[in-house]
């Protein structure tokens, strides 16, 4: 794993930069926000990196802050969100702003990321809000990955969202639900609570 690169900025394009380290030029993909902050070509630069290894390619993604890197790594962990969408997210919003939007379950704001519709925005919020309850600082706890959401709870929440309820309504409706209950039982419980609230 390459944790960071420190060397000379050789060139930059609209989506990447080439950094020379020890006579080798590394192509690093960065967000628009990070690219804008890079010094002039020929200057020394240090970028944190995430290496994605696939059968057909090894790709380096670069970041100028730990917040940006941590949020990128959480975003690509969401099903259906790849590095391109994660970089688009970091190009559209500062890490703190995006983390706060996810914690606040602001589907409208998250769906403003290029390539992200309402459905994907809801999935990002559903899968990440627990680890971002304290905003961006929640990513730097003990370094322990957030526990995976209970499958039944996840399924019931997705079902409620598909019925047109907001993620906030779904969360409130499922609060205090019996632990270990199946998706069907959880959905019944939530609908009962939403019915009595209406």
Image: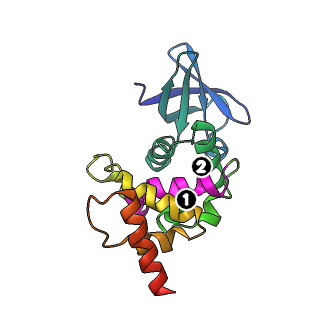
Check disc 1 and report the residue beneath it: 98
Whole-angstrom CA distance, mark 1 to mark 2, is 8 Å
The stretch drawn in magenta includes residue 125? yes
Residue at left offset 58%, top offset 44%:
86
Q: Residue 149 appears at what percent x and percent y? A: 36, 53
Bounds of the magenta segment? 116-137
Residue at left offset 45%, top offset 46%:
74
Q: Of label 1 and label 2, which has the lower sequence position?
A: 2
Relative to 36, does residue 103 appear above or below in the rendering? below
Residue placed most toward the observer, 12 or 165: 165
Q: Is mark 1 on a helix, strand or loop?
A: helix
Residue found at the far right of this picture: 14
Check disc 2 and report the residue beneath it: 90
Q: Residue 61 appears at what percent x and percent y? A: 55, 33
Asked if disc 1 and disc 2 are in contact, CB closer than 8 Å, the reply is yes
Q: What element carries label 2?
A: helix
Evaluate whether residue 157 shows in this view.
yes
Q: Residues within 10 Å of mark 1 (few under 14, many from 20)?
A: many
Main SS, magenta residues:
helix
Residue placed most toward the observer, 18 or 41: 18
Q: Which picture quadrant has residue 162?
A: bottom right
Residue at left offset 42%, top offset 74%:
173
Quadrant where the N terminus lies? top left
Horizontally, residue 58 falls left or right of residue 144, namely right
Q: Residue 107 appears at what percent x and percent y? A: 60, 64
Q: Which picture quadrant has residue 98?
A: bottom right
The stretch drawn in magenta includes residue 118? yes
Q: Which picture quadrant has residue 164?
A: bottom right
What color scheme is it? rainbow
Relative to 102, does residue 14 appear above or below in the rendering? above
């Amino acid at each position: 794993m390459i944790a960071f690169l420190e060397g000379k900025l050789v060139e930059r394009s609209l989506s990447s930069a080439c950094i020379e380290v020890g006579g080798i030029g590394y192509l690093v993909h960065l967000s628009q926000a990070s690219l804008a902050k890079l010094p002039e070509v020929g200057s020394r630069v240090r970028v944190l990196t995430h290496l994605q290894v696939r059968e057909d390619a090894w790709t380096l993604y670069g970041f100028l802050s730990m917040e940006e890197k941590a949020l990128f790594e959480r975003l690509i962990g969401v099903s259906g969100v790849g590095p391109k969408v994660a970089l688009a997210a970091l190009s559209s919003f500062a890490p703190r702003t995006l983390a706060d939007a996810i914690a606040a379950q602001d589907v409208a704001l998250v769906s403003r990321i290029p390539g992200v519709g309402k459905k994907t925005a809801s999935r990002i919020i559903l899968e990440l809000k627990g680890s971002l309850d304290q905003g961006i600082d929640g990513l730097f706890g003990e370094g322990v990955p957030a526990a995976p959401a209970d499958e039944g709870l996840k399924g019931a929440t997705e079902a409620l969202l598909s019925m047109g309820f907001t993620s906030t309504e779904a969360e409130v409706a499922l609060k205090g639900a019996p632990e270990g209950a199946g998706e069907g039982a959880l959905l019944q419980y939530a609908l009962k609570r939403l019915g009595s609230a209406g």
